[in-house]
Image: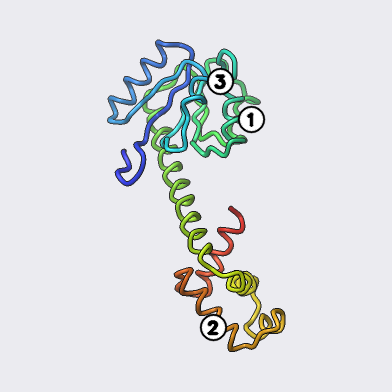
Amino acid sequence: MTNLSGPVETVFIVDDDAAICCGLCDLIESAGLKAQSYSSAEEFFKRWNAGMAGCLVLDVRLPGISGMELQAKLMEAGVSLPVIMMTGHGDIPMVRKALKAGAVEFLIKPFPDEELLQSVQQAFALDRSQRQADQLVKSIQARAATLSQRERQVMNLVAAGLTNKEISEKLHLSVVTIKLHRGQVMRKMQAESLADLVRMSERISTS
């Protein structure tokens, strides 16, 4: 399923076996999805850009950088593209390591076509959710950037649970002034309620 409001969702396949890449691309495209294949982790990493969306179907054993190493490099680079691992030589410790590192699924070759397609749909849904969350954080950060230094102080103290009186004492300002700042914060942040403002503050403090 292509997300018309954002980048085209694509299944990025990394496997040094050209026949497997060709077969998986045919399968994925027969399901109405877009696919691209790469023969090595290095090739994929060089072509990667933040505008890519979808998921990565990654073979564990690759020449040069292994699939597990590529997964780690992507995590270090802050890339949240969901990963589906595959191998013809899987073992339990390897599966556990890949899943612990965030892989959506670990498929043992040969696997049923439907198993891969189901994993891809699951990964696509996860990627959409992650990108929506990222967009929300960016939107909140943009609103927070319009706050004055004093308004940002007030927002942080309100989010910490302090009352207007407690904030006025802490900042050595009148309660009336704090109420005015608080009203400005609510307006600029487009917060519908105190709970809404607290959630926004939490999102940008943990991003």
Residue 159 % position (x, y): 61, 71
Residue for point 51% across, 17% down: 40
Mark number, residue 60 = 3
Disc 2 versus disc 1: distance between alpha carbons? 53 Å
**Colouring method of the image:** rainbow
| Badge 2 or badge 1: first in the primary sequence | 1
Disc 3 versus disc 1: distance between alpha carbons? 11 Å
Mark number, residue 134 = none
Side (left or right) of 159 relative to 25: right
Which residue in the structure is indicated by mark 2?
180
Q: Residues within 10 Å of mark 1 (few under 14, many from 20)?
A: few
Q: Kindly state the secondary structure of the residue where label 3 is placed.
A: loop
| Badge 3 or badge 1: first in the primary sequence | 3
- Compared to 105, does 138 lie above or below? below
Which residue in the structure is indicated by mark 1?
97
Side (left or right) of 162 relative to 50: right
Residue for point 51% across, 35% down: 104
Disc 2 versus disc 3: distance between alpha carbons? 58 Å
Q: Kindly state the secondary structure of the residue where label 2 is placed.
A: helix
Residue for point 42% across, 38% down: 51
Q: Residues within 10 Å of mark 3 (few under 14, many from 20)?
A: many
**Three-letter amino acid code of the residue under disc 3:** Val
- Residue nearest the viewer, comparing 64 with 115: 64
**Three-letter amino acid code of the residue under disc 1:** Lys
